[in-house]
Image (spheres, coloured by chain):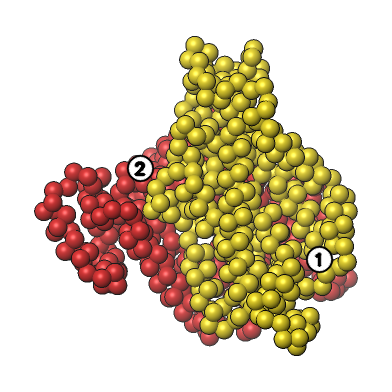
């Protein structure tokens, strides 16, 4: 196990390096003068010159990169000109809102996807299988930005069950019920696509395991059907699902951009879209870097969980 | 979903080609009722989009403020009108031309570049393989849509830039899948035979390996094209894709969002179109995957 963990953790280093390189390159590729882009069109020539010196923009690109990386590692992401506040403060605040949304969506995704996948596999070729298989396909074919609006029309405007937009902070003055009330629609809209993917994978993975000899042996020994499915089949099937759950986190973090826009959720996705509109390049850079590095770590965690569950991986 | 359905472990690993595979594939595909339904829907949608200039449609850009936000089924406007009084049916068909062609182009670009990377990496192996696939890993390290948004931030909003961004984001799926298949083909007997005949490496790569990698490429295309149509529409929805006066389904949705309380049909119409096309593509994609590689069923 230890050697696998070390190997997998070491893999993170070149990938993270590549990610920082790509995010840094965004600045070089923006047409025009980067310092002017960072400071906005009303910047004075003196300020532009000062910033150019600070960011080593008059030096070759590799020196610029090292300077930039040094700043980022020490938590200095620069200052957003459109918001006039440090980028780090803004992205951390926004990211906590996104994590609340995406985390809840992940919970729904995993529960819904696993249950639908197990039921479909156990009831293969029966109506439950057909219903869940088609349901999963519908889920993963619906654009989440459209589903979010349909939810608003049906459940907020039509039935009046939920608010149309807005968010309450998880640890704010409003009680957990109010927080949840605002979370249900956006989190579900975000979760359904990923749940479709998980359901399909769980189904095929379960079907494969249910065909194995040891499952037949367990059944032959007279163990209850429920125990065979959950203790013998599911535990082996879920091993293949775990890394894909990690990948789905990427879809949830990305898809959050749409859902945040529709529901007025003050997350990092909506911040990015606004920042692109105002050409606030430091805000875009900081936001993208934070989310990407988080995603790299989540995938690492998913792979480690998979290895912990499956000795074939950690010993192989 | 492309991440899940196009994972490398699902790619066919043998290059054994059955005779007249096209005919067999078609026969298998025809047995799948959902795939056939999907094919019919797609054929109708593509035909409508292609024939748009010939159809007796109202000018999609013609505004008529006095007649704005008319409901579905109103006189002269089968699907109603939008906030400027423009005919929604006409805009839907013309917007479909944009959405579909952008999605298909994005798929072709991603498939060409991604497959080439996968072929070269898998065929030459060693340092070439390593450096190419590490680059692919870095692209995969970004959450899917986030990378597209970052690219649009660099390139600037616009339909072509959105299409480029979506293609780049999808390159890894092709590269990984094609590399996996290529690696398994390189050690096959007919590639050995071609080597023994002293064929050039380029000839082996493109004449021997590529044709046998095609099923992988086709499966990956069929599983990603719907996603690419959705995501380009999504970028337009956010205002990062199609800019006025050009309008695709995503931009129509974005505009409809403003009138969600008074006239929800303005956003229901283009959204249904995206959903219908994408689910049809997924039905066909599933059928195609089962037909080309029955072991994956």
Residue at (52, 58) in percent of width and height: B168
**Compared with residue B268, is residue B204 higher up or lower down, i.e. above or below?**
below
Chain painted in yellow in the figure: B
Residue at (52, 68) in percent of width and height: B136
Residue at (54, 73) in percent of width and height: B133
Residues A50 and B33: in front is A50
Extreme bottom residue here? B196
- Crowding at label 2, few (<14), some or many (≥20) Cα neighbours within 10 Å? some
- Which quadrant of the rendered structure holds the C terminus of chain B? bottom right
Task: Indicate the position of residue B155 as horizontal and vertical percent values.
Answer: 40, 51
For mark 1, what is the residue?
B295
Extreme left residue here? A46
**Chain of residue at mark 1:** B
**Compared with residue A91, is residue B34 higher up or lower down, i.e. above or below?**
above
**Chain of residue at mark 2:** A
Rendered image quadrant of residue A309:
bottom right
Question: Horizontal placement of B295 versus B115: left or right?
Answer: right
Q: Tell me the element at label 2.
A: helix
Chain painted in red in the figure: A
């Amino acid at each position: 196990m230890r050697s696998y963990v070390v190997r997998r953790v070491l893999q993170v280093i070149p990938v993270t390096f590549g990610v920082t390189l790509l995010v840094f390159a965004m600045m070089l590729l923006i047409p025009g003068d980067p310092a002017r882009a960072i400071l906005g069109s009303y910047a004075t020539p003196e300020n532009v010159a000062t910033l150019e010196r600070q960011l080593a923009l008059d030096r070759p690109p590799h020196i610029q990169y090292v300077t930039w990386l040094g700043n980022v590692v020490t938590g200095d992401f620069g200052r957003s000109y459109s918001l006039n506040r440090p980028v780090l403060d803004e992205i951390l605040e926004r990211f906590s809102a996104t994590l609340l949304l995406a985390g809840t969506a992940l919970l729904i995704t995993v529960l819904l996807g696993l249950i639908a996948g197990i039921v479909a596999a156990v009831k293969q070729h029966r109506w439950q299988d057909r219903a869940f298989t088609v349901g999963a396909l519908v889920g993963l074919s619906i654009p989440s930005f459209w589903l979010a609006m349909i939810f608003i029309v049906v459940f907020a405007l039509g039935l009046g069950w939920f608010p149309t937009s807005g968010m309450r902070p998880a640890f704010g003055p409003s009680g957990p019920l109010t927080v949840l009330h605002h979370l249900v629609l956006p989190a579900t809209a975000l979760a359904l696509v990923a749940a479709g993917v998980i359901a399909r994978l769980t189904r095929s993975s379960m079907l494969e395991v249910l065909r194995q000899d040891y499952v037949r042996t367990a059944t032959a020994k007279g163990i209850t059907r429920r125990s065979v499915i959950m203790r013998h089949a599911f535990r082996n099937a879920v091993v293949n699902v775990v890394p894909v759950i990690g990948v789905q986190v990427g879809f949830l973090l990305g898809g959050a951009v749409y859902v945040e826009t529709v529901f007025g959720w003050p997350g990092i996705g909506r911040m990015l879209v606004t920042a692109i509109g105002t050409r606030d390049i430091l805000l875009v850079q900081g936001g993208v870097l934070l989310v990407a590095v988080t995603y790299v770590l989540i995938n690492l965690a998913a792979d480690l969980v998979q290895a912990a569950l499956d000795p074939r991986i950690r010993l192989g | 979903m492309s991440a899940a359905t196009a994972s490398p472990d699902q790619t066919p690993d043998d290059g054994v080609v059955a005779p007249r595979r096209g005919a067999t594939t078609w026969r298998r595909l025809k047995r799948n009722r959902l795939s056939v339904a999907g094919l019919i829907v797609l054929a109708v949608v593509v035909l409508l989009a292609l024939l748009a200039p010939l159809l007796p449609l109202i000018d999609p850009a013609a505004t008529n403020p006095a007649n704005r936000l008319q409901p579905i089924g109103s006189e002269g406007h089968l699907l109603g009108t939008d906030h400027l009084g423009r005919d929604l049916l006409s805009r839907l068909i013309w917007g479909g031309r944009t959405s579909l062609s952008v999605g298909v182009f994005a798929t072709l670009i991603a498939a060409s570049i991604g497959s080439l990377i996968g072929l070269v990496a898998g065929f030459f192996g060693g340092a070439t393989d390593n450096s190419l696939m590490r680059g692919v890993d870095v692209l995969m390290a970004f959450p899917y849509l986030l990378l597209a948004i970052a690219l649009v931030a660099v390139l600037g909003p616009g339909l072509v830039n959105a299409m480029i961004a979506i293609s780049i984001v999808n390159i890894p799926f092709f590269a990984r899948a094609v590399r996996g298949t290529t690696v398994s083909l390189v050690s096959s007997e007919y590639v050995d035979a071609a080597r023994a005949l002293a064929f050039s490496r380029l000839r082996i790569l493109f004449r021997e390996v590529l044709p046998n990698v095609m099923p992988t490429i086709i499966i990956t295309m069929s599983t990603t094209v719907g996603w690419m149509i959705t995501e380009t529409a999504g970028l337009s929805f956010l205002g990062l894709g199609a800019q006025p006066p050009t309008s695709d389904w995503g931009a129509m949705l974005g505009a409809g969002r403003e009138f969600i309380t008074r006239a929800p049909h303005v956003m229901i119409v283009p959204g249904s179109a995206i959903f219908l096309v994408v689910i049809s593509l997924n039905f066909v994609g599933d059928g195609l995957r089962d037909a080309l590689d029955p072991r994956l069923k």
